Amino acid sequence: MKKIILTVFAASSLLLYSTPSFALVSLSVGIPMSQTISGNTGDDASYDMAYGNAPDKTGGYFLGVGFLSFGIGIDSYTTKFKTGSCNGCWGTANDGGLKTNMTNVFYLLPVPVVNLIIGLGTGTQEYDCKTSDGKGCSAYYDKGSASQWYTSIGMPIIPFFDIHLSYRSITGKNIKFKRDGVKDDNSGSVTGIGLAFNF
């Protein structure tokens, strides 16, 4: 009887640990691959088309820690602008960009074969650049609040490890130009890739 109980316990443990939704602890790390900005920056649509915040290269990280099916995470990344400066930050060096920081909560859905996560996040967006007067973009723009929903789908390579793709939909309409109070809309989306380890 004792051997049967131990055998059942061992088999159950292997099954539960190999099923992503029942992993006791999961750790994930990822990087953003690209960002799109669909909102308008400034109050003139034609101006925005010519000089708006067109995203270029992005860099940073996504981190997540889960316990059973729930978890928390943080995103921190900066996307450079093709124009080299934020809309309205005159005299900037060729390094202007949009900095995003988010705190997330997520849920691992109990589906077979793949690791499917849905999550919500809240945080801030701000322009990050150097200006000719040395004050930086913060002298011209206030930091704005932002929120997001996101999902990722991971394909297990081995029972305790997967590679996943993620998609984030961001609402960020609150970076305010101090001179006239106009708020820039930097809403858009971010795609990323990452690795997760399940214990």
Image (cartoon, rainbow, N blue to C red):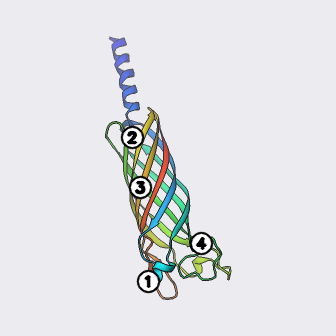
Residue linked to disc 2: 68
Residue linked to disc 1: 46
How would you rate the neighbour count of disc 3 (Cα within 10 Å): few for under 14, some for 14-19, many for 20 or more?
some
- Alpha-carbon span between mark 4 and mark 1: 21 Å
Residue occupying the point 44% across, 83% down:
46
> Could you tell me residue 107's position as x and y percent?
36, 48
Residue occupying the point 42% across, 82% down:
45
> Could you tell me residue 78's position as x and y percent?
55, 64
Q: Nearer the viewer, mark 3 or mark 2?
A: 3
Q: Which mark is residue 95?
A: none
Q: Are marks 1 and 2 in contact (CB under 8 Å)?
A: no
Given the image, on which type of amino acid does mark 2 rest? Answer: Leu
Q: Earlier in the sequence, mark 3 or mark 2?
A: 2
As helix, strand or loop, the secondary structure at mark 4 comes to loop
Residue occupying the point 37% across, 27% down:
15
Q: Is 193 placed left or right of 93 in the picture?
A: left
- Alpha-carbon span between mark 4 and mark 2: 40 Å
How would you rate the neighbour count of disc 4 (Cα within 10 Å): few for under 14, some for 14-19, many for 20 or more?
many
As helix, strand or loop, the secondary structure at mark 1 comes to helix
Q: Earlier in the sequence, mark 3 or mark 1?
A: 1
As helix, strand or loop, the secondary structure at mark 2 comes to loop
Residue linked to disc 3: 167
Q: Are marks 4 and 2 in contact (CB under 8 Å)?
A: no
Residue occupying the point 49% across, 55% down:
74
Q: Nearer the viewer, residue 160 or 71?
A: 160
